[in-house]
Image (tube, rainbow, N blue to C red):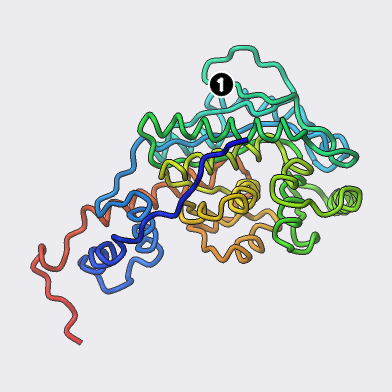
Amino acid sequence: MMLPTVTSPSRSLDAALRAKIDSKTKPLGALGQLESLALQIGQVQASLSPTLAQPTLLVFAADHGIAHAGVSAYPQAVTEQMVLNFLSGGAAINVFCRASGLDLRIVDAGVNADFGTLPGLIDRKIAHGTANFATQPAMTAAQCDAALTAGAELADDLANHGCTVLGLGEMGIANTSAAALLVHVLSGLPLVECIGRGTGLDDAGLARKHAILAAALAHHGQPADARAALMTFGGFEIAMMAGAMLGAAARRVLVLVDGFIASAAYLVAQQMQPALSDYAVFCHCSDEHGHRALLRHLDVKPLLDLGLRLGEGSGAALAYPLVNAAVAFLNDMASFESAGVSEKTA
């Protein structure tokens, strides 16, 4: 498998970017996180006047064999049903993308259904869901590599068509179970801190989920690396998100990371290629148990904290206007000199 190589952006414009930010008609640092975001986008595009073109959000959908073990409050059929809802324009992510001016595209990474040819659906199905990782690895090495490659190719194709900012979302019943184990084995965070209620488990369901995941972990042991962890516990949508993040970053496309599942995909991808961190914007802190701990582990500060736990890329879509605002102030806000405003004297 040959994934694209991600290299850190040049820092040659850092001083000029900081000077441009500091020269705007505001006290130093008064725009807070927007200033660091503007700096990051300028670094990614190697430009003092970056642009956000063809902003796109990809939602990857896939099913998980572990769902049959009883780790979710919803049946597996909901994955297929939600894909149809996305395609008909009725889901939250459709509404938020329309409001934020994002182009939304839906990818079948491995849903346990046969959609045929549906308008708007990108077919990259690896299989009809992963295997049940309670008893065997979720996917084969070939399936894992195919999913990573498909994600990278989708991002590369978007870059070829002018996309400079890419958000990633997902849909897959039981994927919080896959994400919880990926986060645990790759971050070292205690398993109990990584497991949450997902789609709304009650206390008994949460206890059952914890027991099932602890048993799966004991069965497989600690994976050797990020790719092995992905093969053992991951999902096809998680693997494609990881590949898309790497494919986007390799093309100097800004990556908008959504919630807990997307952050688990990021953790996989970043351990494969650490320079990915330079291209990633963490959009929100999910209310799914484990996400806040993971963000602390990664030492990143998300743009929003709204108590969301929907997935679908919803946090990325809601955060995009802030990304747009960071570029707008960098490019369009007057400087003290151009506006004839006196600067601080002491």
Horizontal and vertical percent position of residue 252? 41, 45
**Residue at point 10% right, 62% down?**
338
Q: Quadrant of the N terminus?
A: top right
Q: Nearer the viewer, residue 252 or 94?
A: 252
In-image side of 175 versus 340 (left or right): right
Report which quarter residue 33 is drawn in: bottom left
Report which quarter residue 244 is drawn in: top right
**Residue at point 62% right, 53% down?**
271
Horizontal and vertical percent position of residue 38? 34, 57
- What secondary structure is found at the residue carrying circle 1? strand
In-image side of 162 versus 269 (left or right): left
Q: Nearer the viewer, residue 192 or 306?
A: 192
**Residue at point 49% right, 52% down?**
280
- Amino acid type for the residue under numbered disc 1: Leu
Residue extending farthest to the top is 117
In-image side of 263 versus 344 (left or right): right
In-image side of 53 versus 295 (left or right): left
Q: In which quarter of the image is the C terminus?
A: bottom left
Horizontal and vertical percent position of residue 137? 83, 39
Total labels drawn: 1
Q: Name the residue carrying label 1.
A: 121
Query: Does 170 appear above or below 324?
Result: above
Query: Does 123 appear above or below 92?
Result: above
**Residue at point 34% right, 49% down?**
45
Horizontal and vertical percent position of residue 190? 78, 64
Residue extending farthest to the left is 340
Q: Is residue 320 visible?
A: yes
